[in-house]
Image (cartoon, grey):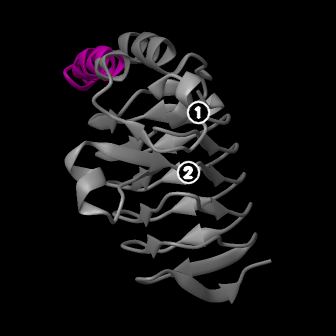
Amino acid sequence: MSKMDELSEKEKMLKGLAYSCMDKELVMERGKCKKLLKQFNDSEPDDFRLRAEVLKELLGVYHKTALIEPTFRCDYGCNVFLGKYFYANYDCVLLDVNPIRFGDHVFLGPGVHVYTVNHPLDIEERRVFQESGKPVTVGDDVWIGGRAVICPGVSIGAGSVIGAGSVVTKDIPPRVMAAGNPCRIIKNIG
């Protein structure tokens, strides 16, 4: 028996290895996350206390200076790490099968999607619900425009701006304006 066979599906997921997303433990964790998100997304507009309590339970660590507007979606929540003064506008999706780390003073426009999950090209692997993940890291003072998509394994350097509607497939260095599909550097802003 190899070391890989000894790992749980969750351990494989967090290590970025191929795993079964239909594993009972993972299905249960996603179910718990969905219940918390329903509570969060159905909250009254002025019920900031309830939303903060739900986010603290969902994310594990939640800075009181961070703000996420409903509606918000994620897979597990526990793999999302928010810096201080984080802001996510309406309709953000963070697919966190691997860690998503945001620095301080990060702003997400409406409808930003961040994906850590990757599905195999092989048909047979997809049919048996195999997937893998790669972490995403966003540095301090980054602004990501509305409807941008950040793909698995990407890092965005501190002080950069990602234009609305961009699809970020590769690392972005610090202090640049980048936009487009695929996202590319437009200019230095340092």
Residue at x-position 29% and y-position 34%: 70
* In this picture, residue 27 sits left or right of residue 9: left
N-term mark: 1 or 2: 1
Q: Residues within 10 Å of mark 2 (few under 14, many from 20)?
A: many
Q: Position of residue 162 (x, y in %)?
A: 53, 70
Q: Quadrant of residue 83?
A: top right
Q: Nearer the viewer, residue 190 or 123?
A: 123
Secondary structure at numbered mark 1: helix
Relative side of 4 to 8, left or right: right
Quadrant in the picture for the N terminus: top right
* Residue where numbered disc 2 is placed: 134
Asked if the magenta segment contains residue 99, the reply would be no
Residue numbers of the magenta segment = 28-45
Going by the numbered disc 1, the residue's amino acid type is Met
Q: Residue 28 shows which numbered tag?
A: none
Residue 186 in sight in this render: yes
Residue at 65%, 63% (x, y): give it. Answer: 156
Q: For mark 1, what is the residue?
A: 4
Where's residue 186, x and y in %? 60, 89
Which is nearer the eye, 44 or 104?
104
31 part of magenta stretch: yes
| SS at circle 2 | loop
